[in-house]
Image: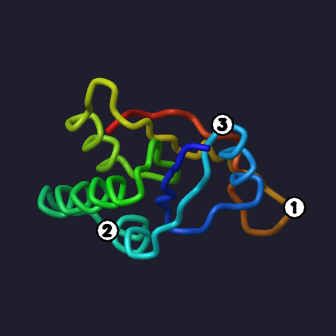
Amino acid sequence: MRNALWIDKKMPSDEQMEEIEQLGYGLLIDKNCLKECGQASINTEEQLDKYFDKLNETMLKHQAEAVFGGFNNAIFGGMYQRRKQDGVPVYASWNTLQWKGGVKPIYWHRKFVQVGEI
């Protein structure tokens, strides 16, 4: 099974873990990278560079062949600027909004979609 990193503000659900395994990946959760990247607030180019430096360092450390999680627009833009031919695929969670009669809406994980490469 190939290694993949998880980058998000929250931990993956059982359903997400199962889907990742079905795609042929074993998920790695690096707590340092999760703290620095998964919970990052990116407001400057310098912060974006730091994000990708940490992500690339962690990918090399774990020999990750994919990245899964949730990403904001700054990160999508950074992926596009840093894209590589034959790079590591990045998958984002496609979430849909669900309303449950009178309670706060929740996001439901539909599936992962490849959004780029780094």
The residue labelled by disc 3 is 23
- The 10 Å Cα crowd at callout 1, few under 14, some 14 to 19, many 20 or more, is few
The residue labelled by disc 2 is 41
| Kind of residue at badge 1 | Gly
Residue 15 versus residue 108: which sits nearer the camera?
15
Q: Are marks 3 and 1 in contact (CB under 8 Å)?
A: no
The residue labelled by disc 1 is 101
Which is nearer the N-term, disc 3 or disc 2?
Answer: 3
Q: Secondary structure at mark 1?
A: loop
Coordinates of residue 45 in the picture (x, y in percent): 13, 56
Residue positioned most to the right: 101
| Kind of residue at badge 2 | Ser
- The 10 Å Cα crowd at callout 2, few under 14, some 14 to 19, many 20 or more, is few
Residue 110 versus residue 7: which sits nearer the camera?
7
The part of the image, by quadrant, that contains residue 32 is bottom left
Q: Are marks 3 and 2 in contact (CB under 8 Å)?
A: no
Which is nearer the N-term, disc 1 or disc 2?
Answer: 2
Q: Colour scheme in the image?
A: rainbow
Q: Nearer the viewer, mark 1 or mark 2?
A: 2
The part of the image, by quadrant, that contains residue 35 is bottom left
Cα distance, mark 3 to mark 1? 34 Å
Q: Nearer the viewer, mark 3 or mark 2?
A: 3
Name the quadrant of the C terminus.
Answer: top left
- The 10 Å Cα crowd at callout 3, few under 14, some 14 to 19, many 20 or more, is few
